[in-house]
Amino acid sequence: MASSAKEDCLYCDGPGQGGVLGELFEWEVRISIGDGDELGPCGSSPFQATSMDALRTAMRGMPDGACVRGRIVHSVCDFGAAPDDRSRREIFRASLDPAGMVRFERVAE
């Protein structure tokens, strides 16, 4: 299926021309509850800025007093394939300060 999809792609060089890579930026909010945490809102986008904005909006929408943190994970995948664990890496961590501002911290490689 992936092979036929690649052949029909308007952006590919044609049949047999592999190497089309795509980026994915996954974002998630974690809510601390008692001794553990729980997954809150999450999503993904092919654009880093869109993922950062969605994470910021989701974190600001949490109930007052909730202890939340967020992260953005970047992955690269071949056209028509799901991202694998080798290409996934956390690039940002986010926290909500007392004033309600979301602070992003770049994760060192």
Image: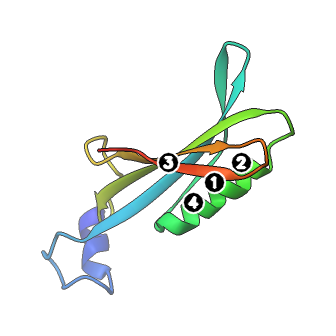
Q: Residue at x 67, y 51 (%)?
A: 102
Please state which of the two labelled residues, at mark 3 or mark 2, is closer to the viewer.
Answer: 3
Q: Which of the 4 quarters of the picture holds residue 16?
A: bottom left
Give SS at disc 1.
helix
Q: Closer to the N terminus: mark 2 or mark 4?
A: 4
Task: Tell me, yes or no, whether the two marked residues, 3 and 4, touch with CB atoms within 8 Å.
Answer: no
Label total for image: 4
Residue 52 disc label: 4
Residue that lies at the very extreme toward the left in this rendered image: 16
Image coordinates for residue 42, horizontal then vertical, percent:
62, 47
For marks 3 and 2, give the CA distance.
15 Å
Foreground: disc 3 or disc 1: 3
Few, some or many residues within 10 Å of mark 2 (<14, 14–19, 20+)? many
Q: Amino acid at mark 3?
A: Glu
Q: Amino acid at mark 1?
A: Leu
Gap between marks 2 and 1 measured at Cα: 6 Å
Q: Residue at x 46, y 57 (%)?
A: 25
First along the sequence among labels 3 and 4: 4
The residue beneath circle 2 is 59
- Residue 36, label in figure: none
Q: Which mark is residue 105?
A: 3
Q: Which residue is mark 1?
A: 55
Quadrant in the picture for the N terminus = bottom left
For the C terminus, the image quarter is top left
Q: Is residue 43 left or right of residue 75?
A: right
